[in-house]
Image (cartoon, helix red, strand yellow):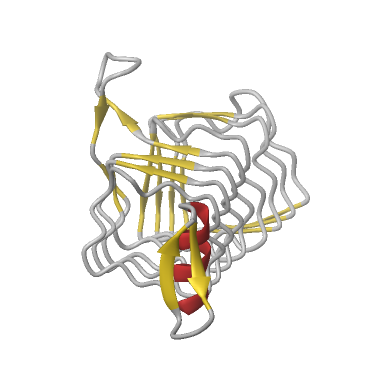
Amino acid sequence: MVYKNKVFSGKEIKGQDFEKDTFLSCRFGGAKLKFTSFKNCEFSLCDFSGCFFELTSFFGCFFPESKLSNLDFSETSFESCDFSKAIMINCTFQKLKEGSSFIKEKLDLKGNVFEKTELENSVFFACDLSGVSFLNANLKGAVFENCNLKNTNFTGAEISAVNFNSSKTEGTILDFNGFIAYGNSKGFVLEEEGLRGRVK
């Protein structure tokens, strides 16, 4: 089914299951997506600002040019989703232990795609992002805390002021500009002669 220019609010889609549906320029502001699941759906130019997620699941979904900024995904699961060109500024990706408001568990985000995604100032807590592509994404000021970034691809990504300090970065892929941006954020400068890094 195709939903176009529809405004979802309140509890009208609470507990519903959507499969192979297309949402075009729809707004979910104030909608309570409790026990709601989406499978193989596309959200194009949609706006989720002010949406409430509670035990919400997305499987195989696409979000081209949709707005998902300032959202907490603590009670949301994403599997095999493509967030390419989505706007997800100042978001929180984490999984809280059932019944707790502060104890975090590992959040599996493997298989999701964040290419050309706006993720400025977003925070990833204890996320497994191994092998995930952030190709050409904007991650300026983002935080990766206790994440698994093994073989994660940051080629072409804006990573200035990104915090990777407590994350596993074995095989993590950065291009030359990424190395420069990350080094500069740590106080290193590139010496022109011989291209050697030195501490200021």
Residue 65, horizontal then vertical, whole percent: 67, 60
* Figure check: 14 above or below 185: above
Q: Position of residue 115 (x, y in %)?
A: 51, 68
The answer to which of 41 and 139 lies nearer the viewer is 139
State which quadrant residue 102 falls in: top left
Q: Residue at x 56, y 33 (%)?
A: 13
Relative placement, left or right, of 104 versus 194 is left
Measured as percent of width and height from the top left, residue 69 is found at: 63, 41
**Residue at the location (32% across, 66% down)?**
152
Residue 114 visible in the displayed image: no
Q: Nearer the viewer, residue 192 or 126?
A: 192
Instruction: Please identify the quarter of the rendering in which residue 174 is found.
Output: bottom left
Q: In the image, is residue 96 above or below residue 36?
A: above
Q: Is residue 122 visible?
A: yes
Total labels: the figure holds 0
Q: Whole-percent x and y of residue 68?
A: 61, 44
Relative horizontal placement of residue 41, taking residue 96 as reference (left or right): right
**Residue drawn where x is 33% and y is 45% of the image:** 165
Query: For this rendering, which residue is in front, 47 or 7?
Result: 47
Q: Residue at x 55, y 71 (%)?
A: 136
The N terminus lies in quadrant? bottom right
The foreground one among 172 and 179 is: 179
